[in-house]
Image (cartoon, grey):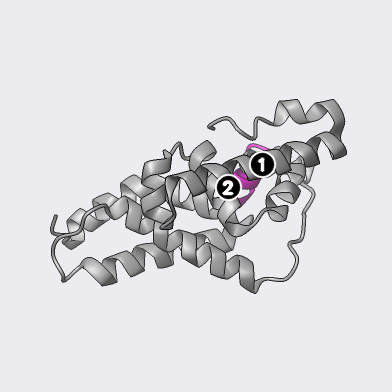
Amino acid sequence: MNIIPEEFQDIVEKQQKKIFRYCFRMTGDFHAAQDIMQDAFVSCYGKYAGSGAIGNITGYIYKTAYHMCIDYLNGRKKARLVELDPEMESPGMGTEESMLSRYYNPKIEECLNALTGLQRSVLILHCVDGIDYREMSGILGKKEAALRKQYQRAKDKIESMLKRNGGAEYEGYGVFRRV
């Protein structure tokens, strides 16, 4: 597959929402997610624009975004949890506020912050983006069995934290269902 600017633009248009959602779930930061998403696409374009054929461009973009998210998470200090303001649900809210009100939950964010970067990524790729372990293996460069184990550990850890901190209300969060 040769990538020319028009073809690359089509790829960006098809993948940008999924990549942004992945980056946002990984970082918990709207602006960082935008920057990482853009950098991932720029990196992909720079690497393959002049070289010709590529295999799985979506996998490459996810892999690039994953490494950039891990770098971001390793570089930041302790995550700050921000309580949502009820006024954010007004019909005139902007893109950032809309994303926060739709995807941000302080209890879930606290649980995600307790996971390793790999566990967080596996959970998001599997539950949010619906990516199977085979494709995830190509993206993350890990064996399928190892990814299954990381998913189970992440799931167990989040369920334990939610049960301990939220009682029966954890059932309503749908952490492990695809959105």
Would residue 93 be visible to someone looking at this image? no
Q: Secondary structure at mark 2?
A: helix
Q: Quadrant of residue 116?
A: bottom right
| Amino acid beneath label 1 | Ser
Q: Helix or strand or loop: what does disc 1 sit on?
A: helix
Q: Position of residue 118 (x, y in %)?
A: 56, 56
Q: Quadrant of the N terminus?
A: bottom left
Q: CA distance from mark 1 to mark 2?
A: 28 Å
Q: Which residues are magenta?
A: 90-100
Q: Residue furthest front?
A: 145
* Left or right position of 164 against 126: right
List the residue tagged with mark 1.
101
Query: In the picture shown, does residue 80 fall above or below 14?
Result: below
Q: Residue at x 57, y 62 (%)?
A: 31
In this picture, residue 34 sits left or right of residue 15 = right
Residue 109 within the magenta-colored segment of the rendering: no
Q: Amino acid at mark 2?
A: Gln
For disc 2, the marked residue is 150
Could you tell whether 143 is left or right of 82 in the image? left
Q: Nearer the viewer, residue 85 or 13?
A: 13
Can residue 19 be seen at all in this image of the molecule? yes
Mark 1 against mark 2, which lies toward the viewer? Answer: 2
Q: Quadrant of the C terminus?
A: top right
Percent of width and height locating residue 70: 55, 64
Residue under the point 73% across and 62% down: 79
**Residue 142 on image: x %, y %:** 44, 55
- Dot 1 or dot 2, earlier in sequence: 1
Q: How many other residues sit within 10 Å of disc 2, few (<14), some (14-19) or many (≥20)?
A: many
Above or below: residue 12 compared with residue 72: above
The residue lying at 58 percent from left, 30 percent from top is: 177
Confirm whether the magenta stretch covers residue 94.
Answer: yes
How crowded pointer 1 is (Cα within 10 Å; few <14, some 14-19, many 20+) is rated as: some
